[in-house]
């Protein structure tokens, strides 16, 4: 039916009576959204309107299964609306759709090409704000990754320095390739780990050189003795000395070594320079 002329009412939200619109009920399988009429359904609307469909602007809303209620208004009248109008919808439904449960706010004509500039600007501002927020988050994430990468690089440089220092202490610099030294150390570690895995219950003897150093550091002063032989293994330590003094005085002056048991000294040779053999064995070891 043709619309009844009426003056548009200014304001943010405007309601026109139903007889001011063109109405149609279209079959639209699969269409469930309200808003501007889909372009594909414009020819169907043209078949039902008494005026040129190009002179109309239409909105639609679902009206049951696979059907759309179409509400159209003249383009010329929409252009005469007050610039502050943000929403235009019918005040009531036509008689053929009076029993429908359609929300009249869904039939807002100010959509698509007639969407108010204020709403367009507001949406643009929201999009820009969202883009700025996303860019800020990405910048912060990038800065975090950059700081973490720099920390990893710094840790790598420190590890390289420590590795070089360790290599220098184990293998003094002889002009060789440091990478070869690293490989040699890794191979040695692998060999030691294989040995440990092969006999995990084997005892680990401490370094006997520490015990020998302890003994020599406490060597008795004031006794005339010449050291002839020093023999050391992980389990035994032997000293042979040539004495120019009383053997008992020498043996009594020797300190006890923690973790080691001293066997009975053996005296050989007679005369002015007897030879004394002193043997130690680690505690828990059989002689």
Image (cartoon, grey):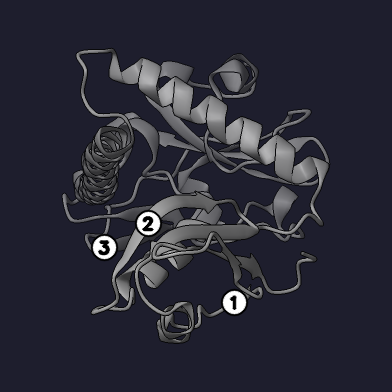
Pick whichever of labels 1 and 3 is earlier in the sequence. 3
In this view of the protein, which residue sits in the foreground, 185 or 208? 208
Q: Position of residue 163 (x, y in %)?
A: 31, 37
- Crowd around label 2: few <14 · some 14–19 · many ≥20 (10 Å): few
**CA gap, disc 2 and disc 1:** 23 Å
Q: Name the residue under label 3.
A: 12
- Crowd around label 3: few <14 · some 14–19 · many ≥20 (10 Å): few
Residue 259, numbered label: 1
Q: Mark 2 points at which residue?
A: 227
In this view of the protein, which residue sits in the foreground, 15 or 227? 227
Q: Quadrant of residue 27?
A: top right
- Crowd around label 1: few <14 · some 14–19 · many ≥20 (10 Å): few
- Rendered-image quadrant of the N terminus: top right
Q: In which quarter of the image is residue 56?
A: top left
**CA gap, disc 2 and disc 3:** 114 Å
For numbered disc 2, what is the local secondary structure?
A: strand
Specify the farthest residue to the left. Answer: 83
């Amino acid at each position: 039916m043709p619309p009844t002329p009426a003056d548009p009412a200014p304001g943010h939200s405007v309601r026109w009576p139903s007889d001011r619109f063109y109405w149609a009920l279209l079959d639209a399988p699969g269409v469930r959204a309200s808003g501007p009429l889909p372009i594909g359904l414009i020819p169907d609307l043209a078949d039902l309107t008494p005026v040129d469909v190009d002179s109309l602007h239409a909105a639609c809303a679902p009206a049951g299964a696979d059907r759309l209620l179409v509400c159209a208004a003249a383009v010329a009248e929409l252009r005469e609306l007050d610039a502050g109008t943000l929403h235009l919808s019918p005040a009531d439904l036509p008689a053929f759709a009076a029993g429908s449960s359609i929300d009249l706010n869904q039939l807002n004509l100010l959509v698509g090409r007639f969407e108010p500039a204020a709403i367009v600007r507001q949406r643009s501002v929201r999009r820009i704000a969202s883009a700025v927020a996303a860019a800020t988050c990405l910048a912060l994430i990038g800065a975090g990754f950059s700081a973490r990468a720099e920390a990893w690089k710094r840790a790598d440089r420190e590890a390289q320095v420590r590795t070089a220092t360790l290599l220098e202490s184990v293998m003094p610099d002889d002009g060789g390739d440091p990478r070869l030294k690293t490989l040699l150390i890794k191979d040695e570690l692998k060999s030691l780990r294989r040995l440990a895995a092969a006999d995990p219950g084997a005892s680990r003897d401490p370094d006997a050189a520490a015990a020998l150093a302890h003994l020599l550091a406490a060597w008795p002063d004031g006794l005339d003795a010449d050291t002839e032989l020093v023999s050391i293994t992980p389990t035994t330590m032997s000293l042979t000395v040539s004495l120019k003094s009383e053997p008992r005085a020498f043996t009594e002056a020797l300190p006890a070594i923690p973790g080691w048991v001293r066997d009975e000294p053996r005296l050989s040779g007679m005369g002015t320079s007897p030879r004394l053999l002193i043997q130690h064995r680690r505690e828990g070891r059989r002689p």
